[in-house]
Image: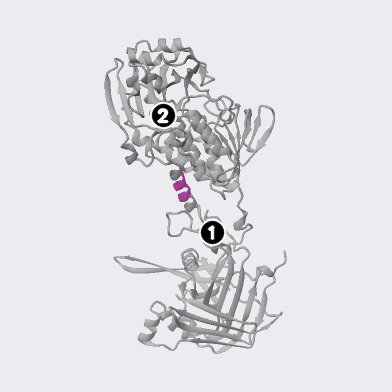
Amino acid sequence: MNGTHTKFTNGDIGEEKPLKVLIAGGGIGGLSAAIFLRQAGHTVEIFESSRFASETGAAIHIPSNVNGLLRRMGLIPEDHGANQCEWVSEYRPNGEQVFLKDVRMLSKVFPYPWQLIHRVDLHNALKAIATSSEGKGTPAILHLRSRVASVDVASTSLTLEDGTSHSGDLIIGADGVHSKIRGALIKDLPPPEPSGSSAFRFLIPIETIRSDPKTAHFAERDGELRLLYGGDRRIVVYPCKQNTSLNFVALHPDEESEASAEEWDQSASKETMLHCFRSYPEDVKAVLAKAAPEGINLWKLLDHDELGRQNWVHGNIALLGDAAHAFLPHQGQGGAQAIEDAAAFGALFPFGTRTEDIPKRLEMYIQARYDRATLVQDVTRQSAFKTSRGKHGGMVMNPMQFTELNFNHDAFDNAHGILLRELRKAAAYQRMPLSFGPTPSPRQDLNGRARTLGKHNYRTSFVTFKTHKSYLNTLLPSNEFVISSQGSWATATFSVSKLGNLAWLGARGYSFFGLYIHDVTHTKEGAGGNADTKEAKGDFLPVLFENMADPIITGREEIHFPKVFATLDEQASASSYKLSAGWEGTEFCQMSLDGLSESVDAESVLQAPVLTCSSNVSSDEKGTTETLSCFSSPALPSQQGEKRWKAASAKIKFTDLEGKELELAFPTLANIVKGLRGIKIVEILNAGVQAFDYSNVSN
């Protein structure tokens, strides 16, 4: 009962279960990771140090590269107040316009729009998707006032400041530039340092600006991103909340405001802000003066040297967002890169990922994200303005110069492609097509892991007979194969098996019909003489007919079985069995068993290893060379509880068609049919049926 070769291991296709993921940090990156992993089918808990009671903040860019990721998770930015970025303009310190560019055409160049949204609106939308009882997956559990104090790599656990500990399969440190996770993982790591600049952040209603003739021109175009340059400072202005508010980011040397490095949204003095930009044109000072004093926040911009790819991951703990790559705001990519990190987790950890897979998947995370995030991070640093305290900046850049680099990337698809290629390379069997990751088969699952046949059923009907060794020798591919029986006689078996309830075929089944030549020995002499000689013994399989394409392809490519297609119509009763093997409606073989009776002393047949052969032909100027390879596959063992029947009589008959009639009826099988019907059945030695139905086995 051969035709499939299975490495028997513990486990079953139904054993997949979710990973338990702990995320430190409930900001944009942490919530995004929670959504992607929740939607992948995992259980997620988020530990956030704050109360989320009075979220503040200004606007944030949603460039094309992250806009598609938000939509993938089900967040439509315009439903939460986002407006499109339609224009980009730049002004010199004296107020002279350098350029005004219509960027609406970017929506035709890139698949998703460049939008602008209030940070709180985005955060609230992410929080709702992550924790809502609606949507795909189990809602993430959000723990507030839960500051992480330490992590333990060995146990994949974290401990909060209140002393409680939580363990999981994977921990993601998304706790920002002051990351506790990062500090616990990397000893003697210098803390983030000031970049040399700080930023005032505030919103002004657009109606307030339009109502004043001195400032109305700042709101004359919807969706305009304005860059107001000074010598060592700049103001970035763009709308949010569906073009009803203008967001201001007023960047300046940090010694002029001396913000605390510990808080990014501390309150600030309006007088200090106005003093920092006293050299700007009158219209700019007039618009700045419209900021409400209580709405001005001060943000000290911190930077951190690259951690090195070896420090992003420790054990089953990984860093994400500013914890891994602190971003300055000069390209509007900080939040986007955190969401890209999160998307990579979603792509690399689909449902079915096992705990033992996590280390390799985290290597893929670094492969997917380190170079990308580090490049964007470095370009952002260089695009800063130069300050007396800062180490970076001063490079003159067109703000549109790096649009292609930033926008033309899909972090989910990129990581998914890496996963497919890495799984395929690691799979036990490399099969066509190669573009979609490991190809499932009886021997491996969609992840390339060894699979079992599971709780399958089978019925094998067989005829073992005596025949002429000389003729069977013609079916052996080379003189390295020898029938070991004494004298001129040999034995062989025609067998047809029907498999059912196969996990790899979605509980379906198929049939196969083959010839097994018994007592065959293959001897391969090595270059070193007898010491290197290899020998294999078993039943040689010249051909195996199957009635389904999938097992034909997998068997040919994975275990080198000589499989071809045929229709295999079977009729069975309590006392008889009949096979009609054919092709496109024309029969080429009948096999029948009659007088079947159950036998308790019958032995299971076809338990020897199966020998097959493949050919590799190469050509050069000296001619053509064929190399034959022999493969030995273990027989599929009989199951405890197998039932067996003996036949009182058996008969095998092949078609009488000859010549062109035979070739026309079986254009791809004619040579095989002629070869098989040339076998003379001198004596039937054994015939019967052996079967196993898993549903009849008591648990």
User: In the image, is residue 79 above or below residue 352?
Assistant: above
540 falls in the magenta region: no
Q: Is residue 488 visible?
A: no
Decide which of 583, 557 is in the foreground and name it: 583
Q: What residue is disc 1 on?
A: 444
Three-letter amino acid code of the residue under disc 2? Gly
Q: Which range of residues does the magenta coloring cover? A: 415-421
Image coordinates for residue 677, horizontal then vertical, percent: 47, 85
Badge nearest the viewer, 2 or 1: 2
Q: What secondary structure is found at the residue carrying circle 1?
A: loop
User: In the image, is residue 506 above or below residue 572?
Assistant: above
Query: Residue shown at 66%/68% (left/top)?
Result: 694
User: Quarter holding the C terminus?
Assistant: bottom right
Image coordinates for residue 653, horizontal then vertical, percent: 50, 87
Three-letter amino acid code of the residue under disc 1? Gln
Type of secondary structure dominating the magenta stretch: helix
Label at residue 332: 2
User: In the image, is residue 440 above or below residue 271?
Assistant: below
